[in-house]
Image: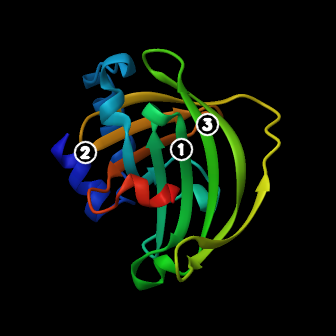
Amino acid sequence: METLIRLLQDHPNDPSIPELIKGAEAAFEVNLNQQSAQLSGVWDLRWSSASQPWLKQAPWLDNLQILDPERSRGMNVLRFNGPLARLAAITVEADLSIASATRVSVCFRKGGWVGPGLPGGGRLALMKTVNQAFPAWLDITALNETLRICRGNAGTTFALLRRHDLNLESFFT
């Protein structure tokens, strides 16, 4: 497990990651009814089986998934990392619910561009309602305080690491 975490942190394109993910999935027994607190937080996408560029890890991007199952909300955030992170982001907000011991149901609500903070609070934003034509979900196949592996409804596998330096609440203000 430590090898997988280290590679995701330092070498997210390492060709051994898919096999290490399979091993991690076999080693975990996930029960979201007991682990919802571990699910909550800001997660950084470090590896994906997807071919779409917005679902892949890139060294110059923060590709974040913010999960707050206690308040039934979540968000995907794609933004430049480093000092440019506060300037703009592409976000998709969602309603979440724990559907089973391993599945999180996702209903996308709105998405768009979120800009810099404004004096006195708030942010510039251009958001549009999302008309989700099909059910979406994440099957959580491995979960602890550091690592989350999941499979989306399209069959894509994602490996994410918790970002302890980012506050979940700051994304919902």
In space, the residues marked 1 and 2 are separated at their CA atoms by 18 Å
Q: Indicate which disc residue 146 carries.
A: 2
- The amino acid type found where label 1 is placed reads Gly
Where is residue 63? Give x, y as percent: 49, 61
Image quarter of residue 25: top left
Can residue 37 be seen here?
yes
| Apparent side of residue 158 relative to residue 95 in the rendered image (left or right) | left
Disc 1, SS: strand
At label 1, counting other C-alpha atoms closer than 10 Å, the crowd grade (few under 14, some 14-19, many 20 or more) is many
Judging by the rendered image, the residue that carries numbered circle 1 is 74
Judging by the rendered image, the residue that carries numbered circle 3 is 95
- The amino acid type found where label 2 is placed reads Thr
Disc 2, SS: loop
| Residue 133, placed above or below residue 99 | below
| Residue 99, placed above or below residue 2 | above
At label 3, counting other C-alpha atoms closer than 10 Å, the crowd grade (few under 14, some 14-19, many 20 or more) is some
Q: Earlier in the sequence, mark 1 or mark 3?
A: 1
- The amino acid type found where label 3 is placed reads Asp
Mark 1 or 2: in front is 1
Disc 3, SS: strand
In space, the residues marked 1 and 3 are separated at their CA atoms by 6 Å
Where is residue 147? Give x, y as percent: 29, 42
Disc 1 to disc 3: CB gap under 8 Å? yes
Q: Judge by depth and name the residue closer to the eye, 133 or 87.
A: 87
In the image as oriented, which residue stretches furthest toward the front?
Answer: 120
| Apparent side of residue 35 relative to residue 171 in the rendered image (left or right) | left
Q: Earlier in the sequence, mark 1 or mark 2?
A: 1
At label 2, counting other C-alpha atoms closer than 10 Å, the crowd grade (few under 14, some 14-19, many 20 or more) is few
